[in-house]
Every structure is written in C-alpha cells, then in structure tokens.
Image: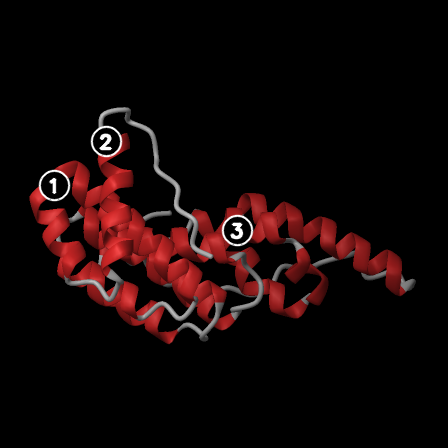
C-alpha cells in the first residue's frame, strides 16, 4: 500500500460478459471471470466496479490485493464505504500504512469506522505505531479507546513490552499511569524482565 494521494481519474465499469449470453448463471460466471481479470490489470477500476456485481464482494483476496496497490487514503476511503467486506486484520494493516503517510488523517479515518472488531483492531495498530514513533502518551490514549477488554489488555501489554525493551525505567513509569491493579503491574514487570534477554515475545493470559 502506498502513501499519498494519486491523481484522480473518472472510470466506467468494465463491460462484462458477451451480450449474446442469455442464461443468468452463465452470464454471471462470465462477468466474474472478467472482473477478476480487471482486478489483476486495473485495481482501481476493479474496486470502482464491484458494487455493480454483488458476487464480486465475496472475492475478499482479490479485493484486499487490489486495495494493497492503492494509496493509503484511497484504500481507507473504499474500506469506509464497505466496512463488512475486508477482514479486521486488513483494516489494521491499512491503519498502519495510513499512519505512516499522514497521522492526522489516519486517526480521523479510524475514528470514522463503525464501532466493532475492525475499529478496535485498527486502534490497536495505531497504538503500536505511536509506540514505535516514541509517543507513549498517544499510545495510552489510543489504547483507552479500544472497547474490547481483551484486546485492550493485550495491546497495553505489548506496548509496555516494546517500551521496556527501549527504556526500562520509562516503561515502568508509563505502566504506573495505566488503569491496572498493582499486582497486575508487578506481574507484567516480572514477565517482561524475565524474557527481555531472550529476545522472545512474552504472552499473557487476558482472561
């Protein structure tokens, strides 16, 4: 997925299926084959055409591959119009790519998504991006917006683990500002300290 906004062009849906084919099922099959060819050759045209062919909306691998070839803002706009079409994991990856290009627009886009799994995964992705960029305060604010308690806890722990590997004292100070019971904070410190030297990724029980 690319950053930035490309040039806008007006496109028309591709002509699909020979006009002489009368059988609806055969014609629909031919249209889908042609649409798949369009997805490979012209992702933008493919994505602008899928609404005209409902069967194409089930072609998630094609759609996600086409979206990955667009600029982050273009992909984000399409996903916002089709919130149920792409997987939550892909939405999270789009959020990360969007963040790298334009943080303010990425935040606004994630905020515009419908509440639910996709938005929560996108927020978790932004929290990781904020952490990697060195802004633990923004990471904490983003974590607080996650409405899934399990994902919120696991994201908070992963952020703490990342911070700990960079600056242990700062990470412990950050953890002290989080809405966690003292025994949980102590447990997390023990876990990340024990694995810091091994290079492995610690796992916590969020139940």
Q: How is the image coloured?
A: secondary structure
Please tell me which of labels 3 and 2 falls first in the chain.
3
Callout 2: SS: loop
The residue lying toward the viewer, choosing from 55 and 137, is 137
Q: Is residue 136 left or right of residue 112?
A: left
Q: Which residue is mark 1?
A: 168
Q: Which residue is mark 2?
A: 196
Question: Residue at left 37%, top 53%?
Answer: 154
Single out the mark in the foreground, 1 or 3. Answer: 1
Among the 4 quarters of the image, the one containing residue 92: bottom left
Question: Residue at left 39%, top 63%?
Answer: 76
Residue 67 horizontal/vertical position (percent): 47, 53
Question: Residue at left 61%, top 69%?
Answer: 51
Report if the CB atoms under discs 1 and 2 are less than 8 Å apart: yes
Question: Residue at left 47%, top 52%?
Answer: 90
Q: Which mark is residue 10?
A: none
The residue lying toward the viewer, choosing from 103 and 183, is 183
Please tell me which of labels 1 and 3 falls first in the chain.
3
**Residue 194 in sight:** yes
Q: Which mark is residue 64?
A: 3
């Amino acid at each position: 997925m690319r950053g930035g906004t490309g040039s806008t062009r007006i496109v028309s849906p591709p002509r699909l299926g020979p006009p002489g084919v009368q059988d609806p099922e055969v014609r629909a099959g031919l249209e889908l084959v042609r649409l798949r060819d369009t997805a490979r050759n012209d992702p933008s045209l493919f994505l602008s055409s899928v609404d005209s062919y409902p069967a194409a909306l089930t072609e998630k691998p094609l759609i996600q591959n086409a979206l990955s070839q667009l600029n982050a803002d273009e992909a984000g706009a399409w996903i916002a119009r089709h919130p149920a079409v792409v997987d939550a994991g892909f939405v999270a990856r789009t959020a990360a790519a969007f963040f790298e290009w334009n943080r303010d627009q990425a935040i606004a886009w994630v905020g515009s998504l419908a509440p639910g799994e996709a938005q929560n995964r996108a927020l978790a992705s932004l929290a990781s991006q904020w952490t990697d960029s060195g802004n633990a305060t923004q990471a904490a604010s983003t974590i607080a917006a996650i409405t899934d308690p399990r994902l919120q806890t696991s994201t908070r722990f992963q952020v703490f683990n990342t911070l700990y590997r960079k600056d242990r004292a700062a990470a412990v100070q950050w953890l002290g500002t989080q809405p966690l019971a003292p025994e949980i904070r102590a447990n997390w410190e023990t876990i990340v300290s024990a694995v810091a030297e091994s290079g492995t990724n610690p796992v916590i029980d969020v139940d």
